Amino acid sequence: MRPAAERVLGKHPLGILFAAPYAVFLAAVFAYPLGLAVWISFHDYFFAAPGAQVDRPFVGLANYTAVLGDPDVQQSFANVAEFLVINVPLTVILSLVLATALNSVTRFRTFLRVSYYVPYVTASVALVAVWLFLFGKDGMVNSILGPLAPDPSWLVNSGLAMPVIALFVTWKQLGFSILLYLAALQNVSKDLYESAAVDGAGKVKSFWNVTVPGVRSATTLVVILATITGANLFTEPYLLTNGGGPDGASASPVFVMYQKGIEQGHPDTAAAIGVVLVILVLLISLTSRKLLERD
């Protein structure tokens, strides 16, 4: 029978020692705030002066009922759903196609890879200025389109604001997704491509029958990361549309959380929105994994 210490710590207790700092970090930065948010969402919680003893009674599902019946919250979730419908497929398709092309390039490979990755590591505030220059009322895109330019313009148009934001985030995040696919492509055996070529498959058929199945695990990761990015959308609509405009057409759940929790002083309602958002992201991520990783 194994000693009690070995049953608790395993055969290699030194591994626990090495993992302990990160485990503490996860508990302090993620687990504790999430647990506190869940607790706040079930109470009549409000900000008070440090050290003040105030009563915060348990209210059950009252905050969730208020959140689910709030038109602003409903619209924000509809907005982020529109964002995901545009952003996730575009991110997967463009990053996979570009990664496949970059994987076969021999000249200027490093330059091209860095070019795609630069927007990802550049601060959103700096990139927003470029996007405003392109899609502003008097921007370059409208100047090129001339009489075909939309009226109202892109970022003040309730039907176009969120699609433009989705395109912006897709362009900004594309570099990281390309890197994930480039790493996955290194594990796809060249023998498979040679076998496909012997069977008469061209580049398109090889792409669909060899590349796409070979990087399926990377596709799952890209989809999940894109979903999480959409769920955390805040900076882009805040800067591009002056805070979720026009008329809340680009407001995200995180932005509504900020409004209700910080600006309006209702952290209990904001916490309920956050919990609902976490549950939805988990469900979408699990569904994506089930659909994409069938094996």
Image: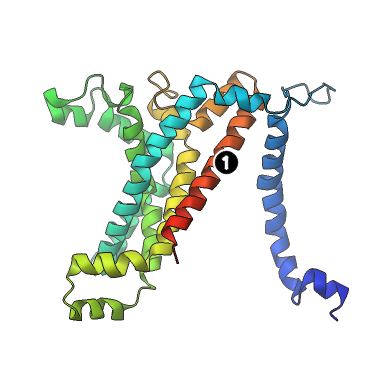
**Amino acid type, label 1:** Val
Point out residue 71 in the picture as x, y percentages from the top left corner: 49, 20
Q: Residue at x 26, y 76 (%)?
A: 193
The residue tagged 1 is: 278
User: Camera-side residue: 28 or 117?
Assistant: 28
The figure's colour scheme reads rainbow
- Visible in this render: residue 129? no
Q: Residue at x 31, y 30 (%)?
A: 132
If the image is split into quadrants, where does the C terminus sit? Answer: bottom left
Q: Quadrant of residue 202?
A: bottom left
Point out residue 294 in the picture as x, y percentages from the top left corner: 44, 63
In this picture, is 121 found above or below 294?
above
Point out residue 274 in the picture as x, y percentages from the top left corner: 59, 34
In this picture, is 157 found above or below 126?
above
Q: Residue at x 35, y 66 (%)?
A: 213
Q: Residue furthest left?
A: 147
In this picture, is 152 found above or below 291?
above
User: Camera-side residue: 138 or 42?
Assistant: 42
User: Camera-side residue: 263 or 198?
Assistant: 198
Q: Alpha-carbon neighbours of circle 1 within 10 Å: few (<14), some, or many (≥20)?
A: some
Q: Residue at x 68, y 28 (%)?
A: 61
Q: Quadrant of residue 83?
A: top left
Q: Quadrant of residue 151?
A: top left
If the image is split into quadrants, where does the N terminus sit? Answer: bottom right
Point out residue 19 in the picture as x, y percentages from the top left corner: 69, 64
Q: Is residue 99 left or right of residue 223?
A: left
Give SS at disc 1: helix
- Visible in this render: residue 170? yes
How many discs mark residues in the rendered view?
A: 1
